[in-house]
Image: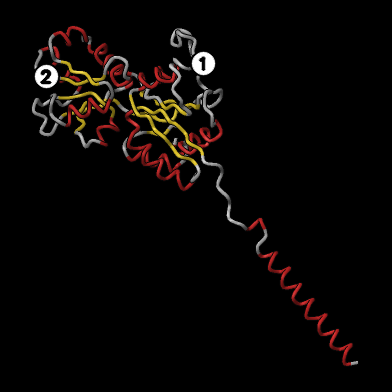
Amino acid sequence: MKRVLSLLLVGMLLCTLLTGCGAGKEENSPSEEPAQTGEPVELTVFAAASLTETLTEIAEKYREVAPNVTLRFNFDSSGKLKTQIQEGAACDLFLSASPKQMNQLDSKADPAVNTEQLDFVLSDTRCDLLENKVALCVPDGNPKGIDSYDALAAALKSGGVLLAMGNSDVPVGQYTQKIFDYYGLDEQALADAGVLTYGSNVKEVAAQVAEAAVDCGVIYATDACSASLAVVDTATADMCGRVIYPAAVLNVSEHPDEAKAFLDYLKTDAAGAVFEAVGFTPLQGSNS
């Protein structure tokens, strides 16, 4: 009998141990394990120079959302970026400071704009992401007393001011040209009179103003904010049209899903708050 009781006790002990082991496995079930990050991916983003500060800040936030994704930015004028894409530079996502450069890469755009019949925009990914303003800025102290576009136009006509603007292949330069047309100003005549200087992107123009190398400059309101420059006037839509920033994943991307995911993040309230802080108006998401 003692032997039988001993065997029963051993059996009960084994059952208890096995039950405990089973419970332990349930507590560590796969459904409760931490989510695993995906394979490492490097995304190359071509973006207008005026997006430098905001996208750099957003990239830091995006690390928490997609820690496996490394963002590599190429900031420059939209015209230069368009040319680099056309010539075969690796690019996953393009953010332009003007629809023109995006249209030149989009097979669905008007052939009058996409004159080379280029096809780089991935279907159904293009969107109008942001809106900006074209600002007239002056150096500290505003030595020439330029306080509006009206005053600038008068000073340019009299030859009493030196204005910095973007080159003709730079969106901010193209918007400035429209402002000239609005006031009936001849850019070539102004250039010949020595009252204009140029920058290859908006950052170069802003730098000329900040260094007081010029009397004033036409840049984006967001760049004026980033550079702590005084804005004395902003152009209306009648003067130069709306300043729209389109964005699109490119069909040459090797990581289209990850590029779409980052573009989707740029439409969120979290990214929108960063854009709004420097003066952009988000056109996507709940902030639009």
Residue 58 placement (x, y as % from top left): 40, 41
Residue marked by disc 1 = 119
Residue 258 vs residue 146: left or right? right
The quarter holding residue 19 reads bottom right
Marks 2/1: CA–CA distance: 43 Å
Residue 277 placement (x, y as % from top left): 33, 40
Towards the viewer: 220 or 78: 78
Labels 2, 1: front one: 1
Q: Is residue 203 visible?
A: yes
Towards the viewer: 16 or 133: 16
Per the rendering, the mark at residue 161 is 2
Residue name at image x 70 percent, y 64 percent: 26
Residue 24 placement (x, y as % from top left): 68, 68
Residue name at image x 69 percent, y 65 percent: 25
Q: Secondary structure at mark 2?
A: loop
Residue type (three-letter) at the residue carrying disc 1:
Asp
- Mark 2 Cα-neighbour bin, 10 Å: few <14, some 14–19, many ≥20: many
Q: Height in image: 263 above or below 178?
A: below
Residue 219 placement (x, y as % from top left): 26, 26
Quarter of the picture holding the C terminus:
top left
Q: Is residue 238 visible?
A: no
Residue 109 vs residue 3: left or right? left
The quarter holding residue 257 reads top right
* Residue at the extreme right of the image, as rendered: 1
Q: Height in image: 42 above or below 14?
A: above
